Amino acid sequence: MRSTKLFVLLFAVAALSGQSVSRSGIHVADMDPTCKPCTDFWRYVNGGWMDKNPIPADKSGWGTFGVLADANRERMKTILDAAAGDAQAKAGTDRRKMGDLYASCLDTATIDARGITPLQPDFDRIAAIQSAKDLDAVLAGFQRRGEPFGAANGVVVGPFRLTSGQDPRNPARVMARIVERDSAGRTGSSIFSLPDRDYYVKTDEKSRQIRAAFLEHAAKMLELAGSTHAVAPEQAKVVLDFETALAGSVMTIAEKRDPEKTYHPMDLAGLRALAPAFDWALLLREVGLPESTPVNVAEPEFLKKVNQQLTAVPLDQWKVWLRWRTLELSAPYLAHPFADESFHFRGTVLSGVQQAPPRWETCANVVDQDLSDALGKAYTEKYFPAEAKQRMRALVENLRAALREELEQSDWMQPETKKAAVAKLNALQVQIGYPDAWRDYGALQIDRGKWFENVRAAWTWGEHYEIARIGKPVSHVDWAMTAPTVNAYSSAADAKVVFPAGILQPPFFDMQADDAANYGAIGAVIGHEIGHQFDDGGSKYDATGTLKNWWTDEDRKKFDVRTGCVVNQFNTLDVGEGLHHNGKQVLGEALGDLGGISVAYRAYKRSLVGKPEPAAMDGFTADQRFFIAFARVWGTQQRAEAMRLQLNTNNHPISKYRAIATLQNIPEFQKAFQCKAGDPMVRPDAERCRLW
Ligand SMILES: [Zn+2]
């Protein structure tokens, strides 16, 4: 049985490189030979490139992911310039919509001339609120539409967002969810104006500076929108106080990682008991859902706090906050004084970016987000070769087989846990390049002269799309990432891993390169995504994507000890300026990296069975090239502000430490570069983390 599989896999792997290997896939000129590999492997691999490529003024960081994303954006530009200039494109077609959306964004003269007028209807609605009943009606109405903010997961004006999500106990169905912000890594998809809860409550110098800068920013923006110079700072203070009160009651990002802690299904009576001050029936009616719709409230404590705000905070303050949120979320899409002020705070203060990107880049990004499937289809038709999909699939299957072997050979799991783990691995769906079906934008209207209305229409279309899924079976076709994205993702509830076309290029994946580099780069990415199915959160879902325990108690305890090793590693790792990661917050990603490199290495070794020892290339052994390619993926440097933002809000470790901390645990790496005990790249045996 196994030998048959092995044969199939070897055959498939042979096809990965076939006759066409023409290069090692590593870039010696990018390295820094003056740095010792066992001292700082990240610098050793990327130092040459980083010295020659400082962070551009319009970026918060710069490296492998960003360079490739820029190249993909240039390709999008080719498509969008052609679509915008195509006078023959028929009305109502995707091509026409893409071209019109892009052109409306580039037309800054019209955008500037319109000033604040696109928001006037919203301001009027908010100003007309006279009673708690009016407030409920406005809040419920805002839930029907998405804001143009461009957050990866959608955002609305109001103290919570009604959206959809898989029912964790029945992953075949989509249910309604009430959230206040999505999990980490999606800054902006939140009801808060500051990046996360800690920004409101921490008392250190840096946090106080950011709050002071926020007050200035909010006052300036409110003044631009018509508040007097005297009143604007008072309004800014109202905004900060309002959000601070809410922030105190939300979970930390680390706490939110536990899917069991964010599962609280309830009916209308439950919602009324939890937050009686709000008219929940009105909300359901407003978004077109029956009163019998079950709703999963991610954070009940938070809704209680919202209820308190509804009863205790004067209407005038609610109106200031709603006006502010409308303005803040729309500002990047308004006339330049608003867009510039928004950039000053979000780009410069929070991320250290010195200068806004060229207009066309902003526009291409918006089309990529807002008409993702129209652009994704055009992009993949033009730039994604069919053979890349086949070869990638072969590689994924080889990784899957290697992990199966790792699970089966693990010396600490009991047979029943192993069996369930392997069943989960076997059931995992793999989607590569682009979705199997594209979304239909038929109902979305795009007007070449109305940029702001276009982006809001696109996000409102997105909100409708989300809400229309509620109560229906899950679509496994839908993707949470666009096809040109340089990234990949894993969904435990959907029991699938997704690799967009955008990442399936050098230096991640190179069809002309030798296997060692491909396994070290895209192989580790595949291993990382598959690994998420078994991380602190993913491991709580079974083979069907149900939130259901499949571990024996004893094995779960052992698993927690093993993952605790990684938490401790990141908690204690010094990242400079006295800063550290929050080990629990980054645990899932760190586990993905650790498991990913291990399984990719095993898969690479499996691919060599029965073949002669691979020759050295570019002066490096195959094992060395494998690890060099891995560290190249994480060759990104960041501005100090962006690093702080990431440590505070993101569940991904800093790139540098994704390379360093991961490899510190890998004996095969240390052997390949003859590192010795005591070298910085070697963790002492007793502290070394290993998952399986
Ligand atoms: Zn990840």
Image (cartoon, rainbow, N blue to C red):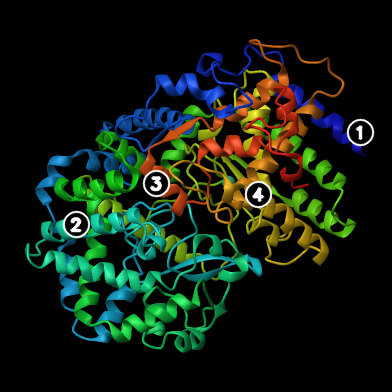
Task: Indicate the position of residue 548 as horizontal and vertical percent values.
Answer: 72, 67
Identity, as a three-letter code, of the amino acid under mark 4: Val
Tell me, for residue 216, which label it has, or none. 2
Residue picked out by circle 3: 369
Task: Indicate the position of residue 683 as horizontal and vertical percent values.
Answer: 69, 38
Secondary structure at badge 1 equals helix
546 on left or right of 457: right
Comparing labels 4 and 3, the label whose residue is closer to the camera: 4
Q: Earlier in the sequence, mark 3 or mark 1?
A: 1
Give yes or no for contact between labels 2 and 1 (Cβ–Cβ under 8 Å): no
Report, in whole angstroms, how far the alpha carbon at label 4 lies from the one at label 2. 40 Å
Report, in whole angstroms, how far the alpha carbon at label 3 lies from the one at label 1. 45 Å
Is the distance from the Cβ of mark 4 to the nearest ligand 1 atom less than 8 Å?
no
Secondary structure at badge 2 equals helix
Identity, as a three-letter code, of the amino acid under mark 3: Gln
Task: Indicate the position of residue 67 as horizontal and vertical percent values.
Answer: 43, 28
Residue picked out by circle 4: 566
Comparing labels 4 and 1, the label whose residue is closer to the camera: 4
Q: Between 258 and 662, which is closer to the camera in this rendering? A: 662
